[in-house]
Image (cartoon, rainbow, N blue to C red):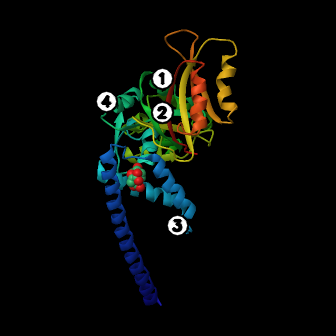
Amino acid sequence: MAGNIEETLAALRHQIDSIDNEILDLLNRRAQVVIRVGAAKSGQGSDFYVPSREKAIYQRLTAANPGPFPNEGVRRVFREVISACLSLEQPMKVAFLGPPATFTHVAAMQQFGMSAHLVPQKSITAVFDEVIRGRAPYGVVPVENSNEGIVSHTLDMFMESDLQIIAEILLEVSHDLLSRSGRIEDVRKVVSHPQAIAQCRHWLEDNLPDVALVDVASTALAAQMVAEDESAAAIASEMAASLYDLRVVKQKIADNPNNFTRFLVIGKASPPRSGRDKTSVMFSVKDEPGILYRMLEPFSKRRINLSKIESRPLKKKAWEYIFFLDIEGHIAEDHVREAVEELRGYCQFLKVLGSYPSAR
Ligand SMILES: C=C(O[C@@H]1C=C(C(=O)O)C=C[C@H]1O)C(=O)O
């Protein structure tokens, strides 16, 4: 009987080996075609990284997948296949808001895969700078959190630079409590970014009512500090646990489990249409009666959905504001372009920040 099982296993493993050989062969055939695409693109000077094409690949494959291989697996496997194929042409350098193991790092990894060369930066300004100076073709920065609202620094940076939005990344944020021992009894203080501490307030009151709460510049820095302090715990990403060799005291301690952060990929030119795109614009309006009403009319009369509107003070002048608008559709579509041009008529200035595939 035991011999039978061994024989069956050996035969099945033999089948797996020959399937893996076929997969390997196909991967190499795919890589050769990607190299040819790269050569064709460099002939015409166009961008090698095309997020709209990548999104179309994921959508097509997950829709066609008969199973039992899970769709999430299809996405992850192809994320890495595409990432490795891209790295053949050139190592894809991506600047992100560091230090290593921030949620921005996790988002950049989700978007660009493990073969990309991800470079941590000290600030959002530094990420923009790397891309402006051409040291990295792309950068990743946070722009809003479902509980905490916008990251104003990122929006402010678009006032100063002419970079474009290339893609958006939606990341489900899981705040984990990490420490060296992984034992809740050892925790005397909790260290993290103030937003992460705020998002875990109730859990901390219920489970660690007497510990000190210490604010630091990022969740990743907190993890780094805790790696050297037995009595401290950090609220940080799961990635921080593996990077700084920490144990998980408790997973998902945020009070609201529905916690998403939206990140932007910035670069020098927006990608072509993907079929489901978004366009972001920023503008300031003339100070006239009814202007707030009129600025939305070009969109409502064309039945164009607006997914977001934000305002920020224009620092040069008190009580004047800059608006940020996210519109459904791509600027290459006539009705979107016409609406934006009509809005421009009411504005002192208007800048299209880019059209890019919608992550939802
Ligand atoms: C191959 C291409 O270039 C890149 C690589 C892709 C891939 O490996 O499938 C897809 C889109 C681009 O980011 C392409 O544009 O088709």
Q: Which residue is mark 1?
A: 156
Residue 133 disc label: 4
Residue 51 shows up from this direction: yes
Q: From the viewer's perspective, is the residue at label 4 or at label 2 nearer?
A: 4
Say which element carries label 1.
Answer: helix
Residue position for label 2: 192
Q: Secondary structure at mark 4?
A: loop
Residue drawn 44% across the image and 59% down it? 77
Compare marks 3 and 4 and give the one earlier in the sequence. 3
The span from disc 3 to disc 4 (Cα, nearest Å) is 43 Å
Tag shown at residue 306: none
Question: Foreground: 254 or 95?
Answer: 95
Three-letter amino acid code at the position of disc 3: Phe
Residue 280 image offset from top left, x and y in percent: 54, 32
Q: Amino acid at mark 1?
A: Asp
CB under 8 Å between discs 2 and 3: no
Where is 331 relative to 54, above or below? above
Alpha carbons under labels 1 and 4: distance apart: 18 Å
Q: Which residue is mark 3?
A: 69
Q: Residues within 10 Å of mark 3 (few under 14, many from 20)?
A: few
Residue 60 location in percent, x, y? 53, 59
| Left or right relative to 14: residue 344 | right
Which tag, 1 or 2, sits closer to the chain's start? 1
Circle 2: residue type: Ser
Is 101 located above or below residue 70 in the figure?
A: above
